[in-house]
Image (cartoon, rainbow, N blue to C red):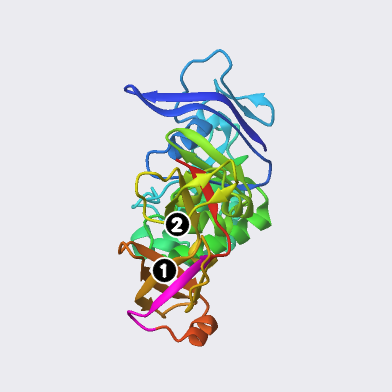
Amino acid sequence: MSIELQHISKTFNGFKALDNVNIKFNEGELTALLGPSGSGKTTLLRLVAGLEESDEHPDSRISFHGEDVGSRSVGQRKVGFVFQHYALFRHMTVFENIAFGLRVKKRDERPSKNEISERVFTLLKLVQLDSMYNRLPSQLSGGQRQRVALARALAIQPKVLLLDEPFGALDAKVRGELRRWLRELHDQLHFTSIFVTHDQEEALEIADRIVLTHDGRIEQTGTPEEVFHNPANEFVMRFLGEVNVFHARVDETKHDILPLRSGDGSDNANLLIRPHDLDIHYEKWNKKAEIPAVVHRVQTAGPIVKINLWDEQKKNILVHLSHEEYRHLSLKRDQRVYLTPRKLKIYSR
């Protein structure tokens, strides 16, 4: 089921939460709506679900597989919705929570008692909770409760699955486990999913495609590789992972970059460099893009070594090295070094 939004805006009390959004979600893809708080992610998701109505516009349209659903209710759109805080019925067992959406269907659409039981137990096996069917939500962990919420959303056999920061209330370890599990589940079922998150690591890890939002507009759409390695603008690059920002003067006539510095008023560009794109060496090479620095702090715990350095203006610079590179350099606190970028992005100011 593909989904397309055309000329969609949404205003709340004079605040424009979405501003003329045009986007298509491809059939069978897991798409991450990524952006900071207040960027319009959840509003867009609620418009797709039918929980909100867009501002009136002669050309606005929300389509499911080419069919306009703008006038249809939530139930008629057949979407499954998973919220951040589970929204489970506390007095109902796991089985009853999952079966609820089936039992409240209209009589002529409602499955039989045996069909409901069969579907619920099939879903319980899918989410690996078949041995806990008779427990109450209070007897489950946060991760287990979120899997029940997902099973309940799938019980009605939705055409589209919408997830609004479903792992936001969980600790880091459980989040990691659940997002890998969700990716595997999606690969089994191949439903069209839209996943709201403000966590770039989460989006880069599980999404087929990322839609990056900011101030109610779409900044960039692409695969995780495309948006990370080829950011459309400075905002996208800053948002997607750690980055060092330097000021420089770019001479466009000579296609030249004058030396990096913290800024003296004459700079006309920002140079953005990822921590893993900086090389550390002991000797001055007299390159224009060379940065003198002093080692301030070294963090060796984890899969990479994180090195904090200070430039001549005591501005912090972050460099990521492999443990092998770090052992080879033998860096020590207060040691003077020089940094050269392997790759950088230039954005005019």
Q: Amino acid at mark 1?
A: Pro
Q: Residue at x 50, y 50 (%)?
A: 237
Choose between 267 and 43: the one closer to the eye: 267
Residue range in magenta is 332-340
Residue identifier under label 2: 260
State which quarter of the image contains the N terminus.
top right
Residue identifier under label 1: 292
x, y (%) of residue 328? 52, 86
Q: Residue at x 49, y 53 (%)?
A: 258
Q: Amino acid at mark 2?
A: Leu
Choose between 30 and 346: the one closer to the eye: 346
* Callout 2 secondary element: loop
x, y (%) of residue 45? 49, 37
Mark 2 in CB contact with mark 1 (< 8 angstroms): no
Q: CA distance from mark 2 to mark 1?
A: 10 Å
Q: Does residue 23 appear to the left or right of 291 in the view shown? A: right
Please determine whether, in this image, residue 104 is positioned above or below residue 311.
above
Q: Quadrant of residue 112?
A: top right
State which quarter of the image contains the C terminus.
top left
Q: Residue at x 62, y 61 (%)?
A: 184
* Callout 1 secondary element: strand
Please determine whether, in this image, residue 64 is positioned above or below residue 194.
above
Task: Determine if residue 127 is in view.
Answer: no
x, y (%) of residue 206? 57, 57
